[in-house]
Image (spheres, grey):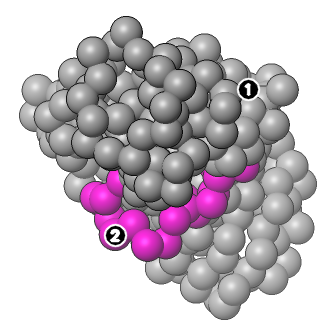
Amino acid sequence: MRLDKFVAGAAGLTRSEARARIKSGAVTVNGSVEGNIGLNLDGSEAVCLDGRPLKASDFIYIMMNKPAGCVSATEDAREKTVLDLLAPELRRRGLFPAGRLDKDAEGLLLITNDGALAHRVLSPKKKVGKKYFVRLSLPLLDDKIDILEKGVDIGGYVTLPCKVEKISDFSAIITVTEGKFHQVKRMFAAVGSRVEYLKRVSFAGLELDERLEPGQYRELCTKEIEKILLTIQ
Ligand code: URA
């Protein structure tokens, strides 16, 4: 494996961050400073970053800006999946989406092969925050905000308290701590409004990187992984 890829994976850096660290002389291979980002490793080398030994990490954490039109699944007989958008070498790494966005929804999707982390992020007990921007085709009346925030019946289930920030009659940001099927759409429908566009902008302490166009993705950096860990401790 190339040195920059190894350092990125083991230290939780992006590939370009890893390259910068290697070029700055922060990486040693078998005790000597190594500046060749493309050095081929056979796995037997002792690699250190800032004097700290690095261990190969099999875990990958990806932030995707999910586009509308594909499903949050690993495979589907009929539909294009979010995994289909990944580079072929990533598709072989046992990745899956940690959580779901509707086919027509966009925004922050965490894709990983760390089953334990995904389990905790999705556990209802952890009450992990999820923030959505919604555009509405039926207006949100002011008196409905309080009702939404206290909890509404979405068909045999009353939602937990949440936060709603009205942006205009036809748009809002809603932060919920649970993930029932079509939850946000059903919540707005319960107060006589209707979601026509939904985008997740934040999840488990992560903010969607707005530089990612729909369909684009990148690996999380260490700080972002630490933020997730903080929300699920
Ligand atoms: N709520 C919804 O209605 N849809 C989503 O995709 C996510 C939350």
Q: Which residue is mark 1?
A: 124
The mark that comes first in sequence, 1 or 2, is 1
On screen, residue 81 versus residue 209, left or right, reads left
Location of residue 123 in the rendering, given as x and y in whole percent from the top left corner: 69, 23
Dot 1 amino acid type: Pro
Is the CB of mark 1 within 8 Å of ligand 1?
A: no
On screen, residue 136 versus residue 94, left or right, reads right
Residue drawn 19% across and 31% down?
89
Residue drawn 52% across and 77% down?
135
Location of residue 39 in the rendering, given as x and y in whole percent from the top left corner: 27, 36
Q: Which residue is mark 2?
A: 213
Residues in magenta, as a range: 200-217
Secondary structure under the numbered disc 2 in the rendered image? loop
Assess disc 1: are there few (<14), some (14-19) or many (≥20) residues with their C-alpha within 10 Å of its C-alpha.
few
State the CA–CA distance, disc 1 to disc 2.
30 Å
Name the one closer to the observer, 148 or 7.
Answer: 7
Location of residue 195 in the rendering, given as x and y in whole percent from the top left corner: 50, 67
Q: Quadrant of the C terminus?
A: top right
